[in-house]
Every structure is written in structure tokens, then in C-alpha cells.
């Protein structure tokens, strides 16, 4: 189905969400039509955030908003759906558009498998009626379902369209870029050079994939790294848990701006605990690049000042490899909690692979290595 037809049938003039590769056609359509617009389209920090934002839109306008997200975000919407939107509470109608990663019978990455199995059940448990859109869904079928859903929405209940891979087509081409010069893969290579045999916890998406391939290319063991292939926004908390229990070991966290934004409260907890052995590197390209490149708000905020306000004793920002190397070496030699923001370009190798070890193998190797440090 053409994405513009899909949007026309939904009939909403306000969208908010967190980008998803399965919804890239919709994301590009929205960026091409609206860009980032307080009136029509906003990218939120996490899925619960955009659900609450949608609720505010409804309260102010009386109209029905659309919230889009990957199915991994269902966990983040459970609280606002159950205690804010539900018709037993405030009866706020929302249309959810959910990218179905890990659909049973469709090959996908390990972090999506269980989420894919429970996608429809979670919606059912939240009392959200769901309709699956696939490549064969016709406009007439969608219009008929939307007419049915309008009656449901009028009662203050929520509905969802679950989007299978390739169901939405004919998206406009949108180019995402910035003026930064450093490449993320090269940034990670510099971190690996300085960190040596220190354990690294890396964030969701291409950063972990690049770290894995760097180790392979260098002939190094993958035991040094915990690849947080799912759980976006939680790698810094995982690293904190490791650092607090391995006080004599330097622990590194390779994070991304979208992940930091998704659960920014983690920085306050890290700053409050001040582990002297934790180095938090935030690679900031101002984009959700792994799922297509749509912008985050990280280019408009001061991550360094936020970190300092959260209690990080040292926080710096770098934009050249020379600055990066100097700060990495200083952090390695130092003895204080440090955040290094690295300004990064948007882009990755076309032939970037994925880890060839399983998530369980990665965890077990990392645990065994931590026993030795």
C-alpha cells in the first residue's frame, strides 16, 4: 500500500513517535511532508513520551493523534496506556502504528524474536484492538477497518495498525546528514585502541555491529564486549551495574544520542553514584541512524552541561580525532567518572555485518571475562 494512501485513510494531522526501520516509508513520508513540526509531527525521546504528548494534543484539540513506533516500544507505552489513555481513566483515543519486528516465521535479529511473538498479545492485554497491515492489504480493506475504528475511538478506546515488513511503499527519498566530520566506526576503533582489555558495554544498533567487526578485523576476542543489541537506552545502566561491582576495573560505555535521550534519567543515577572507573562515551550524530536517520533533538541540547548537572565530575565534547584521542587517554589514565560526547557524522558502510555469535554466547563470554578482572 502506498504510504500516502495509508496516511490519508488514517485521517490524522498530528503524528508523534520513535522511528523504526519497518516504518521507514511512513517516517520518510512524514519528514518530507511536515519535517519536524509542533503542529503536525514530533519525534519523541521514547514511546511513553510520545504517548503522553499525543494525549496532550487530544486534550488541546479534541482530535485523534497517531503514535508510531517499533514493537519493542510497547513496553514503554504500557504505563501511559493503562493509567492515562484507558477508557476507565481519561478515555483518550490514540491510533498506534506499530512496526512488527520479529514476526513469527520471519527471520530477524535475536532481540526481536520474543517481542515479535508477544506483539499482538500485548496490544490485546492493553485493550487495544489491532489490525495487521501486509503487502496484500487493499485500500478498501483499510478504509473499512478505519471506519470501524472511528466508532471505537469515539468511545475513548485506542486502536492499532501493526505493519508487516514491506507493507508500506512509495515513500519519498529523504537524505539525512549533518556537518560533523568523524565516522562512528572510526570513533569506535579509536576507543578500542585506548581501552585495551577493559570491558566495554555498547549500545543498540550499528555501534555494536561496528564494535563486533572491529574486534574481528583486529583478531581480538569478543569477550571484552557486552553488545546491548536490544533494550535501547539501557546500556549506560548496564555499564553502571558492572562498574559498581568491579571497582578495580575500568569500564567503558559506548552510547548513542538517541539512546541517551530515551532514558536520560540513567545519567542522574550514574552521576549520583559517581563510579570513578566508568567512562561514558556518547557518540552524537543527532539521528536515529540505525533505523533510517531521522533526527533526534540531541543536536539542540548540551549533553555536557546535562552530565555535569547530573553529577559527572568531568564531561567534555570533542569534534576531531585529535581531541578524541587526548580525552580517551586522559579518561583511561584518570580516576573519575567521565563523559565524552563525540560529534559524529551520519553514515555507515553498506556492507556492515551483524554479530556472528548469539546473544547468549556473548553474555557467557563476557561473564567469564569479568571473573578474571
Image (tube, grey):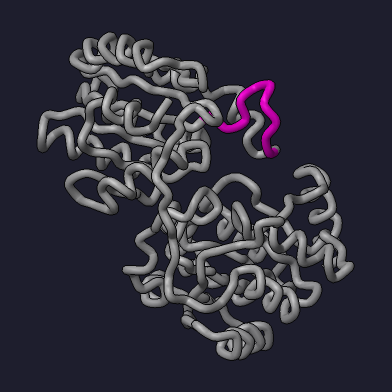
Determine which quarter of the picture holds residue 64: top left
| Residue 125 on image: x %, y % | 45, 17
Q: Decide whether the magenta segment is chiefly helix, strand or loop.
A: loop
Residue 291, position as x, y percentages in the image = 52, 48
**Residue 201 placement (x, y as % from top left):** 67, 61
Location of residue 55 by image quarter: top left
266 sits to left or right of 197 = left
Q: Residue at x 34, y 12 (%)?
A: 140
Taking the spot 52% from the left edge, 78% from the top edge, the residue there is 181
Image point (33%, 35%), residue name: 67
Please say whether residue 102 is one of the residues in the magenta stretch: yes
Compare residues 22 and 321 and report the one nearer the observer: 22
Left or right: 134 in relation to 277:
left
Establish if 269 lies above or below 43. below
Residue situated furthest left in the rendering: 61
Rendered-image quadrant of the N terminus:
top left
Which quarter of the image is occupied by the C terminus? bottom right
Location of residue 34 with respect to 256 vertically, above or below: above
Indicate the position of residue 110 as horizontal and vertical percent values: 70, 38
334 to 31, vertically: above or below: below
Residue at 56 percent across and 63 percent down: it is 347
Q: Which residues are magenta?
A: 100-109
Quadrant of the rendered structure where residue 241 is? bottom right
Magenta stretch containing residue 277, yes or no? no
Amino acid at each position: 500500500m502506498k504510504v500516502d494512501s495509508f496516511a490519508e485513510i488514517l485521517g490524522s494531522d498530528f503524528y508523534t513517535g520513535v522511528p523504526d526501520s519497518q516504518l521507514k516509508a511512513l517516517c520518510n513520508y512524514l519528514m518530507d511532508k511536515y519535517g519536524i513540526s509542533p503542529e503536525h509531527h514530533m519525534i519523541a525521546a521514547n514511546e511513553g513520551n510520545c504517548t503522553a504528548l499525543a494525549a496532550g494534543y487530544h486534550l488541546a484539540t479534541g482530535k485523534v493523534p497517531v503514535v508510531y513506533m517499533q514493537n519493542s516500544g510497547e513496553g514503554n507505552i504500557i504505563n501511559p496506556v493503562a493509567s492515562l489513555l484507558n477508557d476507565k481513566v481519561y478515555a483518550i483515543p490514540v491510533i498506534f502504528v506499530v512496526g512488527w519486528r520479529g514476526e513469527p516465521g520471519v527471520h530477524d535479529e535475536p532481540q526481536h524474536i520474543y517481542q515479535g511473538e508477544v506483539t499482538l498479545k500485548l496490544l490485546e492485554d492493553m485493550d487495544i484492538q489491532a489490525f495487521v497491515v501486509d503487502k496484500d492489504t487493499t485500500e478498501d480493506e483499510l478504509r473499512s477497518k478505519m471506519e470501524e475504528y472511528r466508532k471505537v475511538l469515539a468511545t475513548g478506546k485506542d486502536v492499532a495498525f501493526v505493519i508487516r515488513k514491506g507493507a508500506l511503499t512509495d515513500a519519498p527519498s529523504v537524505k539525512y546528514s549533518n556537518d560533523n566530520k568523524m565516522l562512528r566506526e572510526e570513533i569506535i576503533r579509536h576507543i578500542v585502541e585506548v581501552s585495551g582489555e577493559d570491558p566495554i558495554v555498547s549500545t543498540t544498533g550499528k555501534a555494536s555491529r561496528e564494535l563486533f567487526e572491529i574486534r574481528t578485523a583486529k583478531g581480538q576476542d569478543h569477550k571484552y564486549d557486552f553488545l546491548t543489541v536490544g533494550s535501547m537506552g539501557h546500556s549506560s545502566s548496564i555499564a553502571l551495574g558492572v562498574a559498581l561491582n568491579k571497582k578495580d576495573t575500568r569500564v567503558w560505555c559506548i552510547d548513542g544520542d538517541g539512546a541517551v535521550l530515551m532514558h536520560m534519567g540513567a545519567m542522574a543515577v550514574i552521576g549520583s553514584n559517581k563510579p570513578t572507573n566508568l567512562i561514558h562515551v556518547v557518540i552524537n550524530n543527532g539521528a536515529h541512524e540505525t533505523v533510517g536517520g531521522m533526527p533526534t533533538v540531541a543536536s539542540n541540547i548540551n549533553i555536557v552541561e546535562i552530565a555535569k548537572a547530573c553529577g559527572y565530575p568531568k564531561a567534555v565534547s570533542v569534534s576531531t580525532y585529535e581531541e578524541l584521542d587526548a580525552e580517551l587517554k586522559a579518561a583511561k589514565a584518570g580516576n573519575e567518572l567521565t563523559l565524552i560526547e563525540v560529534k559524529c557524522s551520519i553514515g555507515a558502510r553498506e556492507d556492515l555485518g551483524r554479530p556472528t555469535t548469539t546473544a547468549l554466547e556473548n553474555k557467557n563470554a563476557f561473564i567469564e571475562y569479568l571473573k578474571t578482572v
